[in-house]
């Protein structure tokens, strides 16, 4: 991609078109870095911080977050390890709802999704704003399991799945791009599966900060 452009939003049903190099997966493999964190509801907090419009920080307890508007989207999940899960129903809080509740400052261009153990994934604000992006608590009507990100994971169907961290704990609004955990370790800064943007060596000038 030669410019920042607009994100690709691709959703589909089983049997539909897949991004290049992907294969349909039956079942849902468990893939993550590090151990599965223990959920302690009394200590859990979700935060939105950084370059917010009012300069403040907004936080929710687990019960408070669970009271936010619940919506579903049907969307594909594409893992950089080359499996795809077409047509899953994801339930939770749309990223667009979060942005309406806590507006970003005018200069915000990117967000950093923060998860347990300090894991992070950066993405363009335009990708986070996409109507298919959801802070998910459910898949196909069932609560996520701990191995798949309970109590909260980010799902951004237009990007490879590493851009949607499990065990999400916060979103930081940023006025400049900054690489996240895997982006610092050789993965593509943007991660569009339809352009097969898997690794940092594929980046074109302007697609990411210096490594």
Image (cartoon, rainbow, N blue to C red):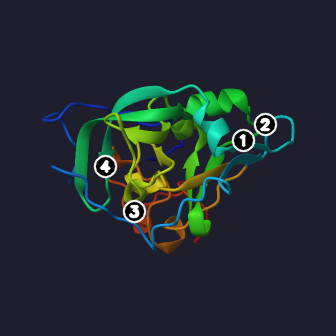
Nearest-to-viewer mark from 3 and 2 = 2
Q: Residue at x 73, y 33 (%)?
A: 102
Q: Is residue 24 visible?
A: no
Task: Pinpoint residue 171: horizontal percent, then vertical percent.
Answer: 65, 48
| Image quadrant in which you'd find residue 198 | bottom left
Answer with mark 4 or mark 2, whichever residue precedes in sequence: 4
Q: Residues within 10 Å of mark 1 (few under 14, many from 20)?
A: some
Nearest-to-viewer mark from 1 and 4 = 4
Answer with mark 3 or mark 2, whichever residue precedes in sequence: 2
The image's mark for residue 105 is: 2
Q: Tell me how far mark 1 sits from mark 2, CA to CA.
A: 6 Å
Asked if marks 3 and 4 touch (Cβ < 8 Å), the reply is: no
Helix, strand or loop under label 4: strand
Asked if marks 1 and 3 touch (Cβ < 8 Å), the reply is: no
Q: Is residue 97 visible?
A: yes
Answer with mark 1 or mark 3, whichever residue precedes in sequence: 1
Q: Residue at x 87, y 41 (%)?
A: 55
Helix, strand or loop under label 2: loop
Residue that numbered label 4 is attached to: 78
Residue that numbered label 1 is attached to: 108
Residue placed most toward the observer, 206 or 63: 63
Q: Tell me how far mark 3 sits from mark 4, CA to CA.
A: 18 Å
Asked if marks 1 and 2 touch (Cβ < 8 Å), the reply is: yes
Task: Pinpoint residue 150: horizontal percent, then vertical percent.
Answer: 46, 52
* Residue 92 drawn above or below residue 146: above
Task: Pinpoint residue 64: horizontal percent, then vertical percent.
Answer: 67, 37
Answer with mark 1 or mark 4, whichever residue precedes in sequence: 4
């Amino acid at each position: 991609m030669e410019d920042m452009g607009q994100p690709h939003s691709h959703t589909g049903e089983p049997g539909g078109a897949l991004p290049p190099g992907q294969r349909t997966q039956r079942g849902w493999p468990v893939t993550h870095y590090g151990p599965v964190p223990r959920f302690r509801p009394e200590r859990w907090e979700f935060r939105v911080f950084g370059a917010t419009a009012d300069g403040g920080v907004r936080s929710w307890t687990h019960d408070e977050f669970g009271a936010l508007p619940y919506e579903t989207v049907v969307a594909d999940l594409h893992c950089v390890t080359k499996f795809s899960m077409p047509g899953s129903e994801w339930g939770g809080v749309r990223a667009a709802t979060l942005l309406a509740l806590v507006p970003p400052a005018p200069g915000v261009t990117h967000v950093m999704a923060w998860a347990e153990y300090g894991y992070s994934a950066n993405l363009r604000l335009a990708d986070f704003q996409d109507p298919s992006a959801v802070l998910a608590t459910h898949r196909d009507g069932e609560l996520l399991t701990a191995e798949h990100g309970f109590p909260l994971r980010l799902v951004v169907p237009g990007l490879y799945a590493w851009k949607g961290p499990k065990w999400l704990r916060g979103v930081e609004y940023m006025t400049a791009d900054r690489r996240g955990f895997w982006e610092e370790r050789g993965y593509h800064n943007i991660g569009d599966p339809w352009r097969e943007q898997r690794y940092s060596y594929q980046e074109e000038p302007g697609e990411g900060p210096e490594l």
